[in-house]
Image (cartoon, coloured by chain):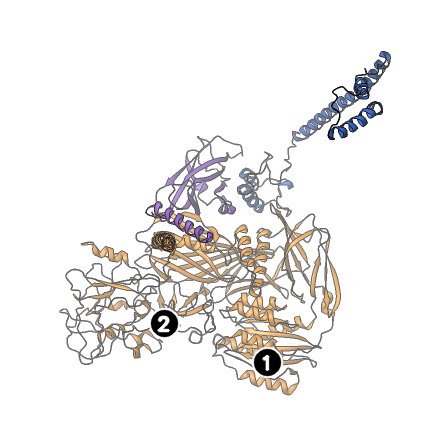
Chain colours: A orange, B purple, C blue
Amino acid sequence: MKARKSLIVAIPSAILLALIPRLMSGCATSDEKYHNVMRVDPRAAYSASQTPGSQLASPPIVVDNQGLSAPTTSPSSELWVIERNAHEEVQQSAVPNQGLSNQSGLTQPQNGERAAQITKVPEKIPYDDILRYPTTSPGSSARDAVFGTPAQHSQQLTAPQDIYDSVLLPTGDGSAGGGSQPQSPPQSDGAAPNNYSQAPVTNVPGSIGGEARGLKDEQLEASRSPNIISIQDPGCGELIIQDHNGQKNVPVPLDHTDVTAQIQGYVASVHVAQRYRNPFSEKIEAVYVFPLPQDAAVNEFVMTIGDRHIRGIIRERAEAERIYHEARAQGYVASLLTQERPNIFTQSVANIEPNKQIDINITYFNTMNYVDGSYEFVFPMVVGPRFNPPGSTDGVGAVGRGQQGTSGQKTEVQYLRPDERSGHDIALSVDLNAGVPIEALDSRNHKIDVKRESPSHVVVSLDPADSIPNKDFVLRYKVAGARLKSGMFVQRDDHGGYFTLLLFPPASLGELPRQPMEMVFTIDVSGSQSGAPLAQEKAATRYCLTHMGADDTFQVVRFGDTSRTLFAAPQPAVGSNVQQALAWIDGFDATEGTMLVEGVHASLLFPHDESRLRFVAFMTDGFIGNEAEALREIHNCLGPARIFSFGVGSSTNRFLLDHMAKMGNGAAAYLGLNDDANQVMGEYFQTISHPALTDISVDFGSMNACDVFPERIGDLFVGRPVTISGRFSGDVPKQVVVHGKVGGKTAEYVVPISAENVESGPPHPLASVWARAKLADLGDRAVWDADNELPVQMKQVALEYGLVCDYTAFVAVDSLTETAGDHGTTVAVPVPVPDGVRYETTVEERPARLPQD
Amino acid sequence: MKLRRVAILICAMVAACLISAGPTEVVALQSPRFEAIGVYIDPHGKPLAAYQFELVAEQGDVTLVGIQGGDHPAYSDPPYYDTHALLADRIVVAAFNTGSDLPANRTRIATLMVRVGGNIEPKYNARLQVAASSDAKPIAADISVEGVNP
Amino acid sequence: MVRIFFERFAPLLRFTGNAIMEENKVPSDTNPELPEELHQAIVNLHTPPIPVPAHLDRLILSAAHVRLTRRKRAVRALGWGSIAAAAVLLITVARFSFIDKPSTPQVAIVGDVNGDGRVDILDAFVVARGIAHHEKLPQTWDVNGDGVVDQKDVDLLAQMAVTVSKGPKR
């Protein structure tokens, strides 16, 4: 009985267990792997090479006894076709052609000879271990012959000549000939020495980043040795030309950027046209990391192929990326625009065929700053090299050209070396229609041409001689009128009513006496501030130190890898203390990292003097990759302090600096390399010398206002208006009443809303302005609030109003253009370091790792 | 005791179901593909100055991935469309031209780039909501949808 | 009537009740003949109803008729009144709905510039054409309420026309 019962239980259990594996195998998995951004996949060439009598789609660079030759058109070399899939090791196969054996024709170097030998490379070599500079030393192993020795690659890569000084090449019979010393470059008459010859290489050979090999024109030869060895490297058909100034022109797939802005009122509508062109001999995917203003609302995206314009679609980011990768894998021309930071975007364009051009047209709008009597239009041109704290992976990496993936960061920017430049240039024009006479206008960083159409209408163009995109374009202009008044813009659509209220501080604020202050000067001494930026910081701090009031106290903080304070506690601003501080800052140099969080803690986390207002002046370029962490710390540590952020440099991280000020209830100012530090700091003192209207709330009267952003209105300082956006129903009120506190005492003032100051509105729907303000506010909250609903809300707003944010992206696929093969090589567009920033102290060059035996 | 009997019974039933199900067939999903859908309007000889149509994907997994204008220069720019179309299985597209060079014969006025997933062949239904001449008067026109070959 | 009933039948009820009680007892009397009292009570049950004089009957009936007829008339009047009121309302609504439009179209529906009762691309086209031809445009065409009829209104109308969530507005 018991046995029978046991059997009844056991048999079904056994059947069930036997069927489980079968069930599991039938379940579909969606473990879809995407290829890494960087791939080498010369399958087209491989396929072409397999066809008898075919010519390679992209001829290899051949190395022969006369030096490095021009690309040939016949496949006669032994090709090493390198394929790579995501997270898998590289697999290599040798493709013999036309009678060449599978083995290298070269022999081991003899007696001190230096030779470049390519042997049959073992399979399964990790991608990162493939060295790019195949120089050898005598007696090295075959692997070392290919990949070089550790000693060779521990050297800092400073000049290509140091790395790849010569290549010894086989003679026609494949055996090493005589000659033991490096010889001079081959003669231009093309005589072929009957031994190993050497040819200096002017640039780094083709890396997987898509660089071209370095060749000198005079070294180009059409012929090649029978034992030709080459590495198939898509994109190496282009040559790097060195001009008479020693500058090397690096081919990049971004030809030109054209920016046209229309400013009406306080909103600018900007159209950015990027022209991508494939200069290489195989199809590529171009990836370009570029900046836009941190409050830019990107709302239109059009891909132009020939005379066809394809409007992109805004989608959830994950879905857009999936669509893009699918289209790319199937060979379709596709483009994807994603946001990495509010002021950093990545543009990817897939399957650009050789010599073909694809234009990407992006339209955005943003509101302009009004500071101390001037409007300011800013167009950033380059992302500055960011410092990322050790261990972080979500930052923005700064790597040298061709060193994709070496920073370990999610987003990477490749930088041109100091002696390199790309052909990418920029044209910019601004159509400024102020509505009132424009009194003064200037550009801090660029030469401009100004065409005045009328007293209130000018067209400003960038001088063609100043078209290198390595610094922010900043246009400041003053308009007529002793003082601008508060005003309201309104518009309605099918969603309802939207308004923007510009609040200027009341004149009476400027008449109130100055209160004693506790001033903290926090100075960035990181590597990116080396040189001119640090000089500006010192000048600005000197001005502040020598213009404080007798009742003020002060502290000086320097931060780099760590932070240090001058005094144990703030000291009175008297002669000896000031002199001590001046001497201290004079000794600063900028060579460290940028641990901004350390600076935040040192500036805020000490006991506060209740009888004084604490103002913290941060001086930095904001080149960090952990902005969210820094802003969160400011939010957590702020207390009663106010933060004023000074962006020092030609291309600062305005997103971070503006938000530091916003989070810190202060204001931001910018000190360019051409600005007068005394003037900028004088304006700063003017601002903080008068009390602000704090704890602001607005009574909208009969207007039913809702969804008002920012939710927490910042302090109102003299000369700096506050912009409030919201939705409303009902009628526009006759006045709004602003409540707040001045020096702890309650205050209010009335802003009349009349027909005169209900303006006709900017050229762009206020609904979108409001949506952008809401996204910014939600994004700020997400820095310190772990509410999981915030990303969902952001995504909903962005999708509803068609805006790009962290959670949405634009994608466009041309289903009518299917290119051969699945996808091309990814080529990142390298950019110059910002003007005034030193490459050596900000961009980390990393040698490739060696293969492990 | 009773519980054990119930457990045995359940196991036996599950096993029976599994055995009777037969070999599990894995239906391999077709890889998504990309297509171009051309929308044509035939205004029967009258110049077409404005149009508006609604396109519905009656079956199939269809995702819009791009919108292009049509063949005629008057409608070469991408038309207006509703961004909310992303959330629904239909889209309304419209465009107009105030110039004088207008198409009067059957013309492709818009091209929709779509991503088709799954195994079901998509089926589209287009409904012409507006077709008007230069004087904003309605005109008789027919609408049709065809795939566009690369 | 109830009182009469009870007066008449109370003895019977009492008697019946007693009879029941008696019945429940084990009968000791086997005599099949009814008791005299019971017999009398049963006989009394069949007493004919009290006749109502005819003229009184007629009076009662006519009074009831009058009363009932008055109510019917009121109801009828109310029904006709309602119908009449509804008709008046309908006519009024129809009258104003199909009112002759002035030469300058009034935007009864937000965005319905051409007055065809719905918002579609034609409304955007009409405004765009007016702008392109530098016509004097009516202020009612300022759809976004910013005080100016311009391209912003055209774009807004076009976007309203293609909005799927609400469809062509009626």
Question: Is A409 left or right of A125, judged from the image as shown?
Answer: right
- Please say if A415 is above or below A257: below
Whether residue A652 can be seen here: no
Question: Real-space Cα distance between discs 1 and 2?
Answer: 44 Å
> Residue drawn at (43%, 45%), measured in percent from left and top?
B62
Crowd rating for badge 2 (residues with CA inside 10 Å; few <14, some 14–19, many 20+): few
Question: Is A534 left or right of A688, judged from the image as shown?
Answer: left
- Please say if A557 is above or below A717: below
**Of helix, strand and loop, which one carries label 2?**
loop
Q: Which residue is mark 1?
A: A556
Residue at the outermost top position? C54
Q: Which residue is mark 2?
A: A245
Viewer-nearest residue: A332 or A122: A122
Tell me the amino acid under the disc marked 2.
Answer: Asn
Which chain's residue wears label 1? A
Q: Quadrant of residue C4?
A: top right
Viewer-nearest residue: A533 or C95: C95
